[in-house]
Image (spheres, grey):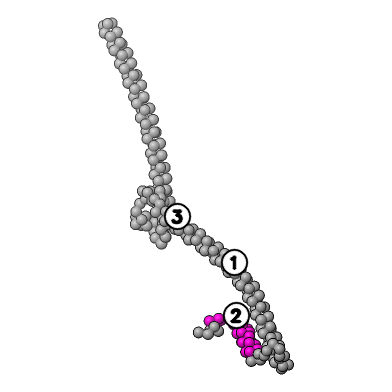
Amino acid sequence: MASGDIVQDPFLQSVLGSSTQARQRCMDLIDLAERSAISSSQTLPEGTKLRLSRQQRLLDADLASLRDASRESILEVRMTKQSTAEARQEVDRLHLQLQNLYYEERHLKGETSACESYDHQYQQLPLIPVEEFLQLQLEHSGDDEKTLMFARINHELAEREALEQERQGLLKTKQRLIADNKKRKDDLASLDKDLETFIDVSSADSGVFEAVD
C-alpha cells in the first residue's frame, strides 16, 4: 500500500510530496555528480557547474520547505495536544456530571419507592368501603384514587363530627335526667320525712285523746 493511500490529511500529503521531491532531487544531484566525476586537478565545465548549482538551489528550496512544514507541523501537534487535553477535560467533566445524574436518579428512585411503600396513617383509618361510599356520594364516582381518598376522609370526618355532636347532646340529656332524678329523690326523701313527722304527731295526739276519755 502506497504512503499516499495511508496518509489522508491534506497538509501531511503536501509534506509527503515535498519530502519525496527533495529525496528525488538528492538522487538527481548525486547522479549528476557521479556522471560528472573528474580528478581533483581538473576543472568542471561551466555547464556542469550550472546544472549542479541549479540542482543544489532546488534542493535547498525543498529542504527549506520541509523545515517550514516541520515547524508548522510541530505547532499543529502542540495545538492538537492542547485541544485534545481540553476535550478530554470536557469529557471527564461531562462523565462526572453523568455519574452524578445517575446517582441522583438512583437516590430519587429509592426515595420514591420508600414513599410508595410507606405505611401511611390514613390507610389505617376505619373508613367505609369504597362501594358503600360511592353509593352515598354519587358525585365522586369519576374521581381518581387521590381525590376519592380525600373525599372518603372528609366524609368520615363529617360523620364523626355529627356523632360527636349527638353524643354531646345525649350526654347533656343524661346529665339533665340525672339531675331531675336526684331532685325527685330528694323531694321523695323530704316527703317521707314529713310523712314520718305527721305520723308521729298523729300518734301523740291519739294518745292524748285516749287519756282524756
Q: Which residue is mark 2?
A: 12
Going from N to C along the chain, the mark reached first, 2 or 1, is 2
Look at 45% across and 55% down and name the residue there. 111
Tell me the quarter of the picture where residue 142 sits: bottom left
Q: CA distance from mark 3 to mark 1?
A: 37 Å
Look at 40% across and 52% down and name the residue there. 118
Q: Residue 17's x, y, as percent?
A: 61, 84
Q: Which residues are magenta?
A: 6-34
Q: Which residue is mark 3?
A: 111
- The answer to which of 110 and 46 lies nearer the viewer is 46
Q: Residue 202's x, y, as percent?
A: 30, 14
Q: CA distance from mark 3 to mark 2?
A: 57 Å
> Can residue 204 be seen here?
yes
Look at 64% across and 76% down and name the residue there. 70
The three-letter amino acid code for the residue at tag 2 is Leu
Q: How many other residues sit within 10 Å of disc 2, few (<14), some (14-19) or many (≥20)? A: some
Asked whether, in this view, residue 97 is left or right of residue 150, the answer is right
Q: Secondary structure at mark 1?
A: helix
Q: CA distance from mark 2 to mark 1?
A: 24 Å
Asked whether, in this view, residue 80 is left or right of residue 114, the answer is right
- The answer to which of 9 and 143 lies nearer the viewer is 9
Tell me the quarter of the picture where residue 182 sits: top left
Q: Is residue 210 above or below residue 112?
A: above
Q: Which residue is mark 1?
A: 86
The three-letter amino acid code for the residue at tag 1 is Glu
Q: Verify whether residue 135 appears in magenta.
A: no
- Residue mark closest to the camera, 3 vs 2: 2
